[in-house]
Image: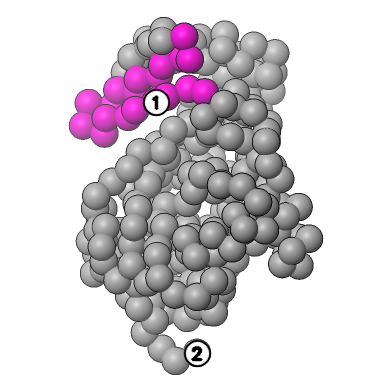
Amino acid sequence: MRIEHIYRFPVKGLSAEALEEATLIQGQCLPHDRRFALAQGDSPFDPGAPVWMRKSNFACLMANARLAKLHTAFDPKTEELAIRKPDGEMLVGSLRTPEGRASIEDYMTAYLAEEARGRLRLVEAPGYNFTDIPQKSVSIISLASLAALERAAGMRLQPLRFRANIYVSGGPEWGDFDLMGREIQLGQARLRVWKRIVRCPATEVNLDTGERDANPPRTLREHFRHMDLGVQAEVLEGGRIAVGDALEPLDPA
């Protein structure tokens, strides 16, 4: 298998950003991945005492399909976030200042309207990632497995519906499941695959239209007798990864 795409999602629920390379750090997520989130108006999340919470506490595609219509970009050097609505209206706000964060909160609260369940809060906590599981991991999807799902569904499914960090080509369909419990070499980094990813209604959303036009969890269940696509891997030894790098098992099956 080889890396075809690397993505990070700086703000939970918002746009992916493609990378040519990244440096993985032991025990951490991909840098800047899910670093920020928009806490729902009724969410009890406390940045001063962060504990893992389910995605329903934050703006996310599972509950807020219209997020797919937004185009966003994050600059980690300036820590500015740009958000563009479907009508072309754009906001650029600094995540370093209370004023910048407040402008983003106001903009997104108005956009989600009643779906915001009150006023959204842009939240961040040092060392915390707003991932769907409490453990810090890097998510990997086999494009061969995705192709099998597409054939079963009878339609093309955008890879980014599944919001993974790394997409790999090569290997057999569902071959990534054979890596469960095993160590792998990914570029210069060493990881351990430890969990299959159970798919949720977020994958129903067409990223171009913001409409729910497919049901991958049901297709997986009906055709493959599971609801999984992709795996989670823990970074055991950090290092650089880049598009084109190989994914190789380090121990026998």
Tags 1 and 2 touching, CB below 8 Å: no
Q: Nearer the viewer, residue 167 or 21?
A: 167
- Does the stretch in magenta take in 64? no
Pinpoint residue 167: horizontal percent, then vertical percent. Answer: 41, 57
Q: CA distance from mark 1 to mark 2?
A: 41 Å
Q: Amino acid at mark 1?
A: Thr
The reply to whether residue 137 is visible in this rendering is: no
Q: What mark, if any, has residue 72 been given in the picture?
A: 1
Secondary structure, mark 2, is loop
Q: Earlier in the sequence, mark 1 or mark 2?
A: 1
Q: Nearer the viewer, residue 28 or 194?
A: 194
The reply to whether residue 217 is visible in this rendering is: yes
Secondary structure, mark 1, is strand
Q: What mark, if any, has residue 253 been given in the picture?
A: 2
Pinpoint residue 82: horizontal percent, then vertical percent. Answer: 35, 20
The residue at 54%/58% (across/down) is 146
The residue at 47%/9% (across/down) is 87
Magenta region, residue range: 69-87
Q: Amino acid at mark 2?
A: Ala
Pinpoint residue 179: horizontal percent, then vertical percent. Answer: 50, 78
| Left or right: residue 242 compared with residue 69 | left
- Does the stretch in magenta take in 82? yes
| In the image, residue 119 above or below residue 43 | above
